[in-house]
Amino acid sequence: MSFTKLSVSALALAAVSATAAAARDQISIVGSSTVFPYTQAVAEQFANNTGSPSPVVESTGTGGGMQIFCEGIGESHPDLTGASRAMKASEWEKCVENGVTDVTEALIGFDGLSLAVSRDNDYDWDLSLGEIYLALAAEVPVDGEWAANPYSQWSDIDSRLPATDIVVLGPPPTSGTRDAFVELAMHAGCEELDYVANGDFDGDWIDENCSRMRTDGPFVEAGENDNLIVQRLDSDQNALGIFGYSFLYENMDKLKGVKIDSVEPDFDTIADKSYPVSRPLYFYVKNAHRGVIPGLNEFVAEYMSEDALAPGGYLSERGLVPLNDERRAELQERVLDGVAMDPKE
C-alpha cells in the first residue's frame, strides 16, 4: 500500500476519536506469532528504559490480529498488530467500516519461512519446492490426472529421500505464515511440476487448485504457538516444522535448517532473496491512539530505534533480517511522523 502525509484535519479527527482510550495505561498489541518475539523484545526494552508497564503482547496470528485490530478505536481495542504479510484489501475495508482509517504501516525487516528438523536426524535435507508441494498438497498429479495426494513417505516422492513417514508441522489458516507459505512455497512448487508447467493453467487455476494443504495426516496444524513446533521437533527426530527464521535461529542447538533448492536459510540468503521463501514482516499502529494511550509514542520510537532495527541490533540478534540503511531511514522517518496508509490505494 502507498502512503500519504496526515492532514491537520485527519489528526484532529483522530484525536477526537481516541478520547475514550485514556483510561488504559498499558499498550495492547496483537498479531503474528512470527513478529511476536520481536515485538516482545521491544516491549521489554521499552519497559526497562522508561519504567512504564510492559505492553501486553498477544500471539493471535496475522489474520486474527487484523480482525481484532480493525474492530474499532478506543481503550477496548489494541493499539498495534504484527503481521507476517501486508494487510489485505478486505482487512483494510473492515478497518474503514469500523472507523480505523488512520493507520501507519511499518515494514520492519525480513524473515525466511524456514523448514527445520531435529539435529538428531542425520539426513542431509535438501528439498525442491516441487517436492515440498508433493509432500503437503491436498491434490497432486497422479498418473497424468489431478487427484488426492497418495504420498505417505518421503521416499514415495523421490527414492533419494528417507523412507520415513511424511510428518510436517505448520501454521493454521489464520496465520500469516500459512498465507506466505502457500504463496511462496506451495504455489511456486506447484508451478514446477511437469503436469502444471506443460499444461494450459493460469494464475487463477493455481490459486484454486494448489492452495489447499492436505488434511489426511502428514501435514499437522500446530496452532499459533511456534514454540510448540520446536518442542515437537525436539522430541520427534523425523518430523519437520515450518516457522519463521527467528525460531530456527534461537534453537540452533536443537534444530537444523532444511535446504530449499540447495540454499540454507540464514541472514545472507534471506536478505539477498536467494533463499526461495523469504518475506517482509510488518506492524501496524493506530495513529488515533498516539498521544492518548500512555507510552505509545515512546514504544513506537523504541521499535524504530537503531538499537532495535540496525544490523547488530537486538532484533537482529533474535533473527530479524534488517533493512538496508536507506530503507531503514525512510521507514523510521515515516513511522515516527505518523504517515498514514492511503485508503484509496
Image (cartoon, grey):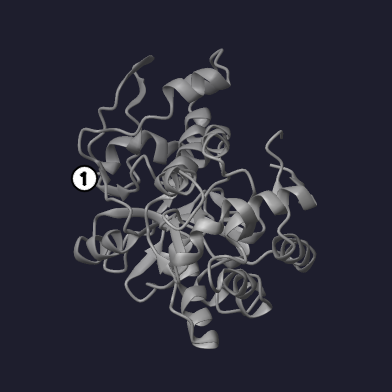
Q: In this view, does 301 lie to the left or right of 191?
A: right
Q: Residues within 10 Å of mark 1 (few under 14, many from 20)?
A: some
| Circle count | 1
At x 76%, y 48%, the residue is: 9
Question: Residue 93: image x %, image y %?
Answer: 56, 33
> Where, quadrant-wise, is the C terminus in this rendering?
top right
**Residue 269 picture location, percent across and down:** 60, 60
In the picture, which quadrant includes the N terminus?
top right
Q: Please tell me in which quadrant of the rendered image residue 106 appears.
A: bottom right
Taking 93 as reference, is 56 left or right? Answer: left
Q: Which residue occupies 53% across, 77% down? A: 317
Q: Is residue 21 visible?
A: yes
| Callout 1: SS | loop
Query: In the picture shown, does residue 48 fall above or below 97?
Result: below
Q: Name the residue under label 1.
A: 165
In this rendering, would 168 be left or right of 286? left
Mark 1: which amino acid?
A: Asp
- Taking depth in this image into account, of 311 and 195 the one nearest to the observer is 311
Q: In this view, does 30 lie above or below 250?
A: above
In this rendered view, identify the residue nearer to me: 246 or 99: 99
Residue 109 vs residue 269, the one in the foreground: 109
Residue at horizontal 45%, vertical 71%? 25
Q: Tell me where residue 137 appears, x and y as whole percent.
A: 35, 32
Q: Is residue 201 above or below residue 74?
A: above
Is residue 155 placed above or below 12 in the rendered structure?
Answer: above
Q: Is residue 104 visible?
A: no
Is residue 331 shown left or right of residue 267?
A: right
